[in-house]
Amino acid sequence: MAIDRVEIKDFLVFKGEFVCDFCPGVNVLIGANATGKTTLLKEMYRATETFIGDKTNGLADDVVITYPKGNKTIIIPKESAQVIFGVPQRNDFKVISTGVEERVFIPEKDILEHAKGLLTFIEQKQTGFGQIYKDVLINALDIPTQVQSEIQQKVSKIIIDTIGGVVRWDKSEGSFYTLRTDGVRIPFANEASGYKKLGFLGLLVTSGQLKKGSILFWDEPENSLNPELMPTLVEILLKLQSNGVQIFIATHNSNLAQLFDIKWTDRDSLQFCNLSKNDDGTIRCDNAASYSKLYMDATEEILTLGPGIVRVFSFAYLLMGINIVTSYYLQALKQSINALIVSLSRGFVICLILMTLLPAIVGFNAIWLTMPLTELLTLFVALKLLRKNEAERLLAVLKTPAEDGNRKCTS
């Protein structure tokens, strides 16, 4: 019920051979511009266009799969869909998947605002919008289903609470609008851009199109979305994948990618696909279950050392705050030299000395003790300076009455 793998050879931006494997849950496509992220989404969407065969022709258990730009029609078993598109031996786009119940594409730019009359223009080929945008409009016109799973109901509630209402279609006016929970009606042209995206997603959920076995393709979902809403977006997508929806998103936003890394659990299916160009112009896909693992070769040794290193470093954070506050406190008392000593001690002098001596004396692994020991020794320095400053202040207070008495005696 999902796309497992895509194999491409000399197809559009993909020169040479390209292979990428996917998980049945959320697949986050990242990479620089012109590495084929949007192209991959659109072509996978087109490739999964399926039509159930006519029972009278004995094709009840088969799927007819067509590719809009080609003239090839292939009839294959529904349970193991394997499709090849394009010119043999030259342009090759191959999707390996198991039967897809439904698929939906959400483009980068909103077109629901311009829905009035746009569908007719697309059908008459009077615009530059293609079949995908026609599908977007048709999907948005679907009526809410009466039967929703518990997950669909939860997702719908999250979206309603976030945007403050639901998106509806006004058939008489031929336009969309947001119906607020207080009864106010907001024309879609006047709705916030980020709310439009979430509202459209809510339409797809309530109409039953994002159900178990369906696929969601979403190009740059973070566009026009306030950063505060990104955790909500990630929560929604993770809930949908837990309900059996396979999700593909293309993004340039590292914060969004890291939020998936933070919020996912062992029950979720998540994969990051980093698309990048080789020196010869070909594109490769590097997969990882964690965003950080895309940029770090996590060997068995690193995975073994990691937890212990983090525990050692955690002690440094306990002392770091005290040292930083002490430095600012000394600055507030106009003790700039003492404040500078604290800053240089923790940021350069003690740190450099320990980094040099510890590995040489104790062993290489002792280098991880540098930060906590630096903060500890800096704390002693800071306390010494504070004590010295306090002693000088008390001495100044004690001297003041004596000086006043001497003045009186003299007079």
Image (cartoon, grey):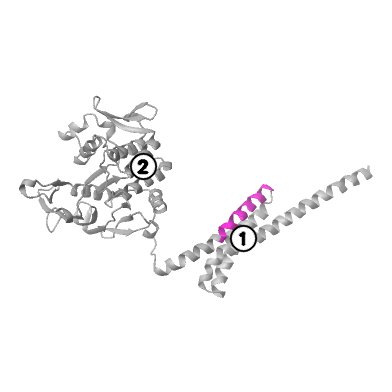
Residue 182, x across and y down, in percent: 40, 27
Q: CA distance from mark 1 to mark 2?
A: 53 Å
The tag on residue 152 is: none
Residue 114, x across and y down, in percent: 26, 31
Snapshot quadrant of residue 201: top left
Instruction: State left or right for residue 304 relative to residue 1.
Output: right
Q: Amino acid at mark 2?
A: Lys
Name the chief secondary structure element in magenta. helix
Vertical position of residue 130 compared to residue 297: above or below: above
> Within the magenta stretch, is there residue 328?
yes
Q: Nearer the viewer, residue 80 or 276?
A: 80
Tell me if mark 2 has few (under 14), some (14-19) or many (20+) residues whose alpha carbon lies within 10 angstroms of its own.
some
Determine the residue located farthest toward the left in the rendered image: 57
> Within the magenta stretch, is there residue 327?
yes
Q: Amino acid at mark 1?
A: Ser
Q: Which residue is mark 1?
A: 345
Q: Which residue is mark 2?
A: 154
- Quadrant location of the C terminus in the rendered image: top right
In the image, which residues are magenta? 315-333
Circle 1: element type: helix
Does the image show residue 282?
no
Residue 309, x across and y down, in percent: 50, 65
